[in-house]
Amino acid sequence: MYPRASGILLHPTSLPGPFGVGDLGEIAYDFVNFLAQTGQKLWQVMPLGPTGYGDSPYACLSAFAGNPLMISPEKLVEKGYLSPDSPALAAYPQLSADKVEFEAVAAAKGAIFEDSFVYFQAHASLSDRKRFENFCKCQQNRNWLRNYALFAALKQQYAGEPWDTWDEGLVCRDAQTLREYEQALAGPMLYHQYLQFLFHQQWDELRSYAHLNGVQIIGDMPIFVAHDSADVWAHQKLFHLDAHGKPTVVAGVPPDYFSETGQLWGNPLYNWEVMAKDNYAWWAERFRVMLNLVDIVRLDHFRGFEAYWEIPAGEKTAINGKWVKGPDKAFFKAIQKSLGHLPFIAEDLGVITPPVEDLRDSFGFPGMKVLQFAFDDTSANAFLPHNHIANSVVYTGTHDNQTSLSWFDDRPAAVKKFILDYQGSNDANFIHWQLIRLAMSSVANTVLIPMQDILGLDDPTGRMNTPGKAEGNWSWRLRAEDLSQEIAHTLGHWTEIYNR
């Protein structure tokens, strides 16, 4: 299923570019060229949805929609969807090249998108209008798109407040109330549908270019969705909510490597019994839409399908939770029956039990091996390369880890010695390349390296996310000049040497 290959973990918002956030413009195509030049066959991205609280791609406003901040203004001009004389384009502020200033970007790009929407309505060709109409009406988009467009329009109407604080008729989705708001907000709804049309058009073109260059895209799918999302608002019976739309139990994980008090994520938990009655139709649609965006899906928190940590709503930490049985094999059998081949990667980190391993192996899903977890134990540690198996995916670290350089610097002297001895080296210089070489040399079929490790960045410069820290994450950006010929040569060399 997964031929021997390697790739890079880099979220599109981390790409360089002139608009304060990475987008799907020419710089994204340049990055695909870099992947092809260095022999990389995979590009892993984080969830692509519109972000809400904390700007986290793992807490999106929709499990189906795309993030409008990734839309390229330059591509809009090229397509004839935006005037080159757009006032918002001319007035675009100078923003940081190193960090995404999400609030400022949202305001500045929002003004451009409004210009584009007006310009499209006035100047779009008949064929482009038809494309937009078909996008809105096609079977694949019709259900989720209308729900999302109304949700997004209402979020604007209510100044961003969570949906469970809206008028009672909206919270409980009274049919008459919904009809009235759909009529009143027809214009804003069409605008948000237009943004999704732009995102999906630009993403599809970029993905096609990646395929032409031998690059497949791995997408990340969080098992849980945000409470303040179109998905929970539109499908309340599928979640454990009270009569006022508030969660009764929430998701998280018990105390682990990342936190002594566990992680209190706060996502509402699924009512799996209700979902099973229609053979998990909402999930089948979610996977179907996802697999039209990416080639391979990494299932974040895979172990939650076997058993999940249930925390009573209102708890301040995740300590007082309990394990509850998940849908297990019946879920994946139903999805397989609906979709056929399941190109999934199981994020099997954390508290992994034999039943979780059995679930993963029953469907042939590769699991993950993270080198930063390999050296604080014994030579029997499953994350050490000599213990890897072919059907697995090796990372130096993930988006939740320190960069490998800072991780190594923070190890005790004895662990540093073990790492260097394991590699047959006494030299800690360029430790990030030594770890990348270890990953590349593994018997595992797939290797994925965070771009920050390829660049040899330290913390806090290159840290993407610190679990448990609510704000200030996800903002790191690559600079175009970082992708030097020296880095390309070194990465390409190890890729070739280890037949990736």
Image: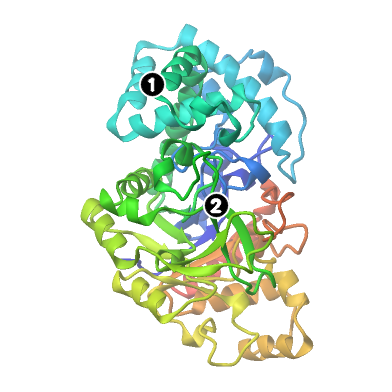
Q: Is residue 51 above or below residue 277?
A: above
Q: Tell me the residue at 48%/18% (across/down).
A: 181
Whether residue 254 appears in this view of the structure is yes
**Count of labels shown?**
2
Q: Report which residue position mark 2 lands on.
A: 267
Q: Nearer the viewer, mark 1 or mark 2?
A: 2
- Callout 1: helix, strand or loop? helix
Tell me how the rendering is colored. rainbow
**Closer to the camera, 177 or 198?**
177
Q: CA distance from mark 1 to mark 2?
A: 33 Å
- 406 and 106: which one is in front? 106
Residue 246 x, y percent position in the rendering: 55, 44
- The kind of residue on which mark 1 rests is Phe
Residue 93 drawn above or below residue 341:
above
Residue occupying the point 51% across, 32% down = 171
- To which quarter of the image does residue 252 belong? bottom right
Answer above or below: position of 422 versus 211: below
Q: Quadrant of residue 147?
A: top left
Q: From this viewpoint, which residue is outermost toward the top?
A: 122
Mark 1 or mark 2: which comes first in sequence?
Answer: 1
Give the image location of residue 106, x and y in percent. Answer: 66, 31
Residue 426 can be seen in this image: no
Q: Can you say whether 498 is above or below 17 in the image?
A: below
**Mark 2 residue type:** Asn
Residue shown at 62%/88% (left/top)? 377
Residue drawn at 73 percent across, 85 percent down:
416
Q: Quadrant of the N terminus?
A: bottom left
Residue 110 location in percent, x, y? 63, 24
Kindly identify which numbered label has been placed on residue 132.
1
- Judging depth in this view, the residue of 36 and 470 nearest the camera is 470
**Which type of secondary structure does the marked residue at label 2 adopt?**
strand
